[in-house]
Image: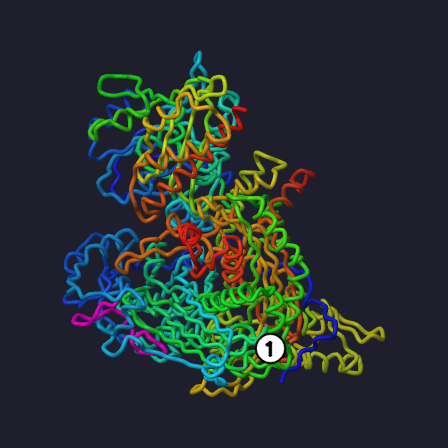
Amino acid sequence: MLSNVKEYFRPKTVEEAFEMMEADREHSIFLSGGTIVALMGSSRIERIIDLKSLRLDSVSIKEDEIVVGATTTVEAFRKDPLMRKEFGDFFYDSFSLVGSWQIRNMATIGGSIAPKLGWSDVSACLLATGAGLMVYGPDGYRRIMLSDYFALPAGEKPLITHIIIKKDGWVSAFEKFSKTTFDIATVNVAISVRPERGRIKAARVVCGSRPQYPMRFETIENALEELEINDVMPSIVRSLVFDNFTGGSNMLASFEYRKHLASVMAQKAAEKIKEMVR
Amino acid sequence: MKIDFKVNGRDYSLEVREDMRLLDFLREELKLTGTKEGCGEGECGACTVIIDGKAVNSCLVLVPEIDGREVITVEGLERDGRLHPLQESFIEKGAVQCGFCTPGMLMSAKALLDGNADPSDEEIMEAIEGNLCRCTGYYKIVQAIRDAAGKLRNGKA
Amino acid sequence: MLKSNSGESTNVVGKMVKRVDALEKVNGCARFAADIAFDGQIYCALVIAEKPHGILRSIDVSLASKMEGVEAVFTWRDIPGDNQLGEAIKDMPCLVKEGEKIRYWGDVVAVVAARDRISAENAAKSVRLDIEDLEPVLSIEEALEDRIKIHGGSNVKVTKLIRKGDPETVIKNSKEVFEGEFYAHYQEQAYMEPQGITVVPDLDYGYTVYGTMQCPYYVQSAVAHVLGLPMNRIRVIQTETGGAFGGKEDVPSYVASYAAVAAFNLKRPARLIYSREIDIQTTSKRHPIKSFYRVAMDGKKIKAIEVMAYMDMGAYATLTPIVMFRTLVHAAGAYDIENVNVDVYGVYTNKVPPGAFRGFGSPQVLFAVESMIDDIAWKLRIDPMELREENTLRPGSRTSTDHLIVESVGAPETLARVKESSHWKDLVKECIEFNRANEDKKRGAGLSHIFYGVSLGAGGQALDKSGAHVLINRDGSVEVRIGGTEMGQGAKTVIAMMAAEELGQRMERILVHQPDTAFVPDSGPTVASRTTIYSGNAVRRACITLKGKLISVFYDLFNSRPDKVKFCQGEVSDGEGRAISFDRLVDAAYVRNVKLFEAGWYDTPKLSFDMENGLGEAYVTYSYASQVVQVEVDMATGSTKVLKGFTAHDVGKAVNPDGVIGQIQGGFAQGMGYALYEDLKLRNGKIISDNFNTYIIPTIHEVPPELVIDIVEDAFSEGPYGAKGIGEPSLMPVPASVANAVSMAIGKRVRQIPVTPEYVLGLIEKKTD
């Protein structure tokens, strides 16, 4: 529990928020959904900067892109009519597996991505949809890919303001293995493909909770190009993931078991995609 | 800092600690001990309250976050000394054993029924998936929620 | 002997009622341990060793004592009485002394008392312990080597045995001999309300202890002991208890002792509420048990059985000797077997001391013996159901301890009921057909058949009694006090029902108070599914006596024949037109100066048992259950889902049928958690799965949509209305039936609990069984 907080800020603009953080990074923390901040047992944190006052909580459509405010809750995002219209049940179903209803009512999309959590189902799904981020940093706004955000060096911490998902007609599926429905993922897999004339024209294959954070596997993605979407496809996906999976062991699972599970989840996701394309 | 908020229909304007959890604020400052602490990390749901209509874990909410908002706890279910249909159904259907998870369950159920008058079994399950119960096996809790939904639909507000 | 009146129809008992304690639990008024507060109270935090094995060289509280908000830091020096908590075996200190050993991670060294909880916890972290590391003993195997001795003598501290007939010879001469090795892991009770106690200096210049607990009398004795005070200065009042399951049998005595040291030294109320992490890391669990079985068959008959069971009892013996007795008696299962050898060993290790948990040492061996029986059924190509039917205990059978049981043996009936409700043969066929048609998922049907010795048994006769106090106020309202505690299982409601039945007063006018050692003498612990019988009989006796007095008053008013007078739902009448309300009859008694309070007492029937050979009457009676579950295993991931459950329980008499169903449902979920999801993880003696994000218990999504429940009522003549107990038997059959179902699904024998996905995958991939 936090015990040393002296100031609680509610910035009106993104610029203000960022400046407040820059003023004393070491002793400050952004609060978005709050599912992480309240658990911090730190006496180092003295300043809380609440991002909810920025009202970055809407989902809108701009040409061929869906723009999601970073403080939109996971539950609101998942049930948003616009999201369901454009992406069907992908986010609705995938995010139903995130935590519990209470957690989803608090956790935000931006807050799920920012801490670079290994087991984040939200990050894995968004990575697979090729999502981009609008971030605000010392040089102002810029747009980067979600994968770029994960690759940023430790010192660079721009503020995520929006998540941008292209309406590109790709078909996506997500599978997660966890011990019970409530547990975090032992491993999760998100796959997105662009189908063209019964073949995979291009793919994005993401494995997360490895236990490290979600990553795209380009070797697998390249190997899937031009692959026919038929009954054999899912098992090919499975072998590819099994052969190329990278990760580690921890309390939840050993590397070998994770690798096996990832390949199985990938096959299930591929099955789903096969059914959606047919 | 000073914040203004509503708890169980009553307005408050108070000076609060910025780092206090809403759970502790409700229990220790407002003396509303109905909301419980079971795990301290948003896993068990015993601390569930409703903020602006949404069920959340109060052990994860910091007090300043309720500024300008309305909070409902289990103590706010009764109206004019009459039990809410959910409370009645929980009693009638035997959905209460040790009672520790009960306030949290009731709040999740209320948040569900306030937004969805005729929930399917899947929707009821989703609403209480974040409320752990070690005594009942959940069966009678689901029956009670279904029963209360029926009562509310039939005008027994 | 108090004869039950089974056969006579009842007005309240056996009917649908609302729980008497539900209202406060739904409106937020129920007061659990953390919900009460006292003026001037201080908050306690514990300083624990955080090492599995070592010698405590020094305790440095200098930094902590000066911290903001801290009143004091107490160590062994501040204990006024005996620095000793162990009951059966006196091996456990209250606060570890310098120069003495640290024996597990959760050994308590100091108690911090501060103005608020955060100050207390911060100060506790600042207490410096200098511990010289010793190599820890972290497994049963290591403990048996006796290379490192945790308490000086052998690590194999306690042994128990059964010697019945001549199994060795029978096995030697038998053509069909089967062997098996099994392991059942720890289980955490995971009650939703963590441990919590407040000790308050009281008006009688002693201390009153409030808190969440099952056994107020254990707490009273422990606190008196640690404070060096006579028991008449310690009063214990149980607060509303948010689940216990055995985890609050002996542990509250420890929690109370730590808080009592602070209360005694500061002369202020001392409050100690455990965080979930400290609770899981330091308090009792289900015992890990490794067991070895050998069984000799003659056709379908089990001729001989040999069992060796090793129990990991952690750093201190605590309740283990008693748990071992139950393991001993239940190891050979619910079967009539002529030749039985059982050896149970309790070994010390440098880990958390396990204690009581629903089933109390039996689920682990019932899982093992039921797996053996199933395995034998497979190998001999006999229907597992038939094998149970052939060997089950029935009236006239002798148990593994040669106890001749003649009444209330509902075992065969429970088998018949689940056979019927599950359509057993069809269910098995359905699974086989499914498995032929599917590769990636497989289904299995598993059967288990169990029994449970009710109450404290031959070893606990000295504790096995209960008192009650029933008082009728002038306005007719009734107050009942018992020594047994409500912890969610429905004790208060059952007691209220029995009082309503016997007195004929309406249930709404009867209040069952929170247990308070000031009113009712030691009534034994609220464990072993004994409350309905023991507290129930005590209450009935008191009520019957009171009713007798009221009948005399009725006679005085109306001259009616006493045997004609009927009490029912608040009305008293004689069937010949003369009637009066209960309340007005009580008023009439009041003005005649009739004594309207009565104490009730029920002493256990005496058991004859030979402890040397483990033979004789082990328990006063037994409950029985049979269960079938259907599971589906994902062959790619190893994860298992329970699809359906069918269960039948012989409870003697269901005093509160709705309550019995609630207990069976809850026990099923908790047993299923043990079977499939609850995997307690340790690293170097430290429990690292110490909250619900890492110790996974079932949510609404895990329980099967269908759980068919059958209640069998084979009356127990000593039980009130024929009742036995349900608290524990509700959980006990589950790990066994689930394991058997998984075994059938994957075609390999499951030999460990929990049946984790990783374990299942390992079995699937193994070439042989």
Whether residue C650 appears in this view of the structure is yes
Q: Is residue B15 visible?
A: no
Residue C628: quadrant of the picture: bottom right
Q: Residues within 10 Å of mark 1 (few under 14, many from 20)?
A: many
x and y percentages locating residue C543 in the rendered image: 64, 77
Magenta span: chief secondary structure: loop
In this rendering, the count of numbered labels is 1
Q: Is residue C478 above or below residue C599?
A: above
Residue at the extreme front of the image, as rendered: C175
* Residue at screen point 33% across, 20% down: A134
* The magenta stretch spans residue B14: no
Q: Position of residue B67 (x, y in %)?
A: 40, 33
Q: Quadrant of residue C211?
A: bottom left
Q: Position of residue A62 (x, y in %)?
A: 43, 13
Residues drawn in magenta = C84-103
Q: In the image, C168: left or right of A216?
A: right
Disc 1 is attached to a residue of which chain?
C
Residue extending furthest right? Answer: C576
Give the image location of residue C282, x and y in percent: 32, 61
Type of amino acid at the residue the image marks with label 1: Asn
| Towards the viewer: B142 or A240 | A240
Say which element carries label 1.
Answer: helix
In the rendered image, which residue does mark 1 sit on?
C537
Q: Quadrant of residue C138?
A: bottom left
Quadrant of the rendering where the N terminus of chain C is positioned: bottom right
Q: Of A188 and A182, which appears nearest the observer?
A: A188
Which residue is located at x 75 percent, y 82 percent? Answer: C556
Q: Is residue C431 left or right of residue C339?
A: right
